[in-house]
Amino acid sequence: MIAGKFTRYIPTSGKLLKDSSVIKNLTGMDVIFLQNERGDDWYEIQSKFSQETMKIVYDENGIITSYSLDASSLNPIDSYVAEISETEFPEGIDILGGWKFDGKKLIQINPDPLDEINSKKIRLINEATAVIATLQDAVDLSIATTQEVESLREWKIYRVLLNRVNPNEPDWPLKPTQ
């Protein structure tokens, strides 16, 4: 579902107006009401979104500015809202201006190859660090097997080699077997 662009409005009658008065009296804060060009109120339309989809907020140019499985956590002021299947939601997406919704799917805008290489490097170092931590615990507690001691050494070498990878000319070391 593409819910359209939501802009501010002030309800003039009905339950929403009454609810906003109650909230203002209880909290001292105003409620921001949003509606799309079809007149759908943001608070009321949220229940029409599937709980199984990712809801995305994007601007006039399709640039992703926010996303969540929970529509109630979004605040799409002067923005559009659409939902897409979780399986079509790309890994590594962010709200830093590098992703766009083209009306059907999310696409990455001119990804910087160095960013991708550095992200891979950080991810692999973090994976190695997690393995090393467990093996190091066994050594520190004097309960490590001979295989764990050797594995620890291999993983530490691997992590050092990962750290030395030149992003301009990546030559990835082989991951140790566990």
Image: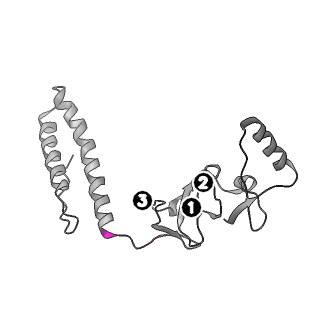
Q: CA distance from mark 2 to mark 3?
A: 19 Å
Closest to the camera, between mark 1 and mark 3, is: 3
Instruction: Report the amino acid beneath label 1.
Output: Ser
Q: Residue at x 20, y 66 (%)?
A: 170
Residue highlighted by disc 2 = 52
Left or right: residue 115 compared with residue 140: right
Q: Which residues are magenta?
A: 108-113
Neighbourhood count class around disc 3 (C-alpha, 10 Å): few under 14, some 14–19, many 20 upward: few
Instruction: Report the amino acid beneath label 3.
Output: Gly
Q: Earlier in the sequence, mark 2 or mark 1?
A: 2
162 up-or-down from 64: above or below: above
Q: Most prominent secondary structure in the magenta stretch?
A: loop
Residue 111 % position (x, y): 38, 70
Neighbourhood count class around disc 1 (C-alpha, 10 Å): few under 14, some 14–19, many 20 upward: few
72 up-or-down from 144: above or below: below
Closest to the camera, between mark 2 and mark 3, is: 3
Neighbourhood count class around disc 2 (C-alpha, 10 Å): few under 14, some 14–19, many 20 upward: few
Q: Residue at x 26, y 57 (%)?
A: 121
Instruction: Report the amino acid beneath label 2.
Output: Glu
Observer-nearest of 11 and 143: 11
Q: Earlier in the sequence, mark 2 or mark 3?
A: 2
Q: Residue at x 87, y 50 (%)?
A: 14
Q: Residue at x 59, y 73 (%)?
A: 103
Q: Which colour style is shown? A: one colour
Q: Which mark is residue 85?
A: 1
Look at the numbered disc 2 and give the secondary structure of its residue. Answer: loop
Q: Are marks 2 and 3 in contact (CB under 8 Å)?
A: no
Residue highlighted by disc 3 = 92
Residue 39 % position (x, y): 79, 64
Left or right: residue 159 compared with residue 114: left
Q: CA distance from mark 1 to mark 3?
A: 16 Å
Q: Are marks 2 and 1 in contact (CB under 8 Å)?
A: yes
